[in-house]
Image (cartoon, rainbow, N blue to C red):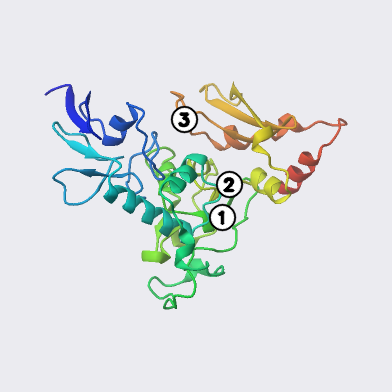
Amino acid sequence: MSETVSIVIDGVSMAVPAGSTILEACRSTDNDQPTLCYLETLTPVNVCRVCVVEVEGSRTLVPSCSRVAEDGMIVHTDSERVRHSRKVVFEFLASSVDMSLTDDATKGWMDRYGCDPTRFGPQAGPVADRDHRHAGHHHAPTGDTAETVSQPVKVDNELYVRDYSRCVLCYRCVEACGIDAQNTFAIAVAGRGFDARISTEFDTGLTDSACVFCGNCVGVCPTGALMFRSEYELRNAGMWDSDRQSVTRTVCSYCGVGCNLELHTQDNRIVKVTSPADHSVTSGHLCIKGRFGYSYVQELGDLAVTPIDEVLARARR
């Protein structure tokens, strides 16, 4: 079998390693494509559909994150059909989900396609009992408002919060909790259609579920639906400032595995811990100790207590 395949992307001929996806081929020539559900360390599930491209001879648009490049394939990533599809998908998502905390790249793509989610009407208010609604039994739309997934934030532990009004059902958290990383399988997608949502088994409370609080789901979330409790509390206090934060890479001190940590600090205080996705040991994943067990570093005794210390102390009560 040939080690490379020849394809044409937007009029440019190239040879890529056999088995490469269209997205990998595009990115190898700095021809980036928008993604939400895709992450290099997780198995592609192609559910968000914002990376779709047009392949000559294919009846439908195909997800570039999972479609393998084939010899002789001719791909168009910026045709009118592709732009229209991506625009509508982004608009549908933003009309029902709070996407204000997505990365700058996603916001840039939405600006590029001229997305206007407000054309579907003002967003409907939050639903307090969304987790208990029967699939397919929500009220009939009136056309006056856009149905949303807005609901109260779930704050039931001191490590992270769940704000599902920001959830786009990208499945990243489910994969990280499952076979791609943690193998705990504490969460899955429940419900159908617009009532589909991330849930524990039988909607059990998180603290009573199989969750081991590793936080790997938080680490892969692209929209802020899963957020460190420290970040959540500091944002609510108006004190979260990513522009003033620095990131220091170090090695976890709890065991001998050698997991790399990225300490995010603000005002000389650790505000959250992540791990580099390209590290050969962690691939971005950590255990509960590595991700959350840093409070001992900030036990300062008689030293000055900053406003950040006060906010983080409240979160631990």
Label 3 crowding class (10 Å Cα cut-off): few <14, some 14-19, many 20+? Answer: some
Residue 124 is left or right of residue 31, and the answer is: right
Give SS at disc 1: loop
Give SS at disc 3: loop
Q: Which residue is drawn at 54% across and 59% down?
A: 205
- Marks 2 and 1 in Cβ contact (< 8 Å): yes
- The Cα atoms of the two marked residues, 3 and 2, are separated by 18 Å
Badge 3 amino acid: Ala
Among the two numbered marks 3 and 1 on one chain, the one whose residue lies closer to the N terminus: 1
Q: Mark 2 points at which residue?
A: 227
Residue 71 is left or right of residue 151, and the answer is: left
Q: Is residue 276 above or below residue 235?
A: above
Among the two numbered marks 3 and 2 on one chain, the one whose residue lies closer to the N terminus: 2
Q: Mark 3 points at which residue?
A: 277
Q: Which of 253 and 189 is in front in this view?
A: 189
Label 1 crowding class (10 Å Cα cut-off): few <14, some 14-19, many 20+? Answer: many
Give SS at disc 2: strand
Label 2 crowding class (10 Å Cα cut-off): few <14, some 14-19, many 20+? Answer: many
Q: Which residue is drawn at 53% across and 51% down?
A: 225
Q: Residue 163 carries which label?
A: 1
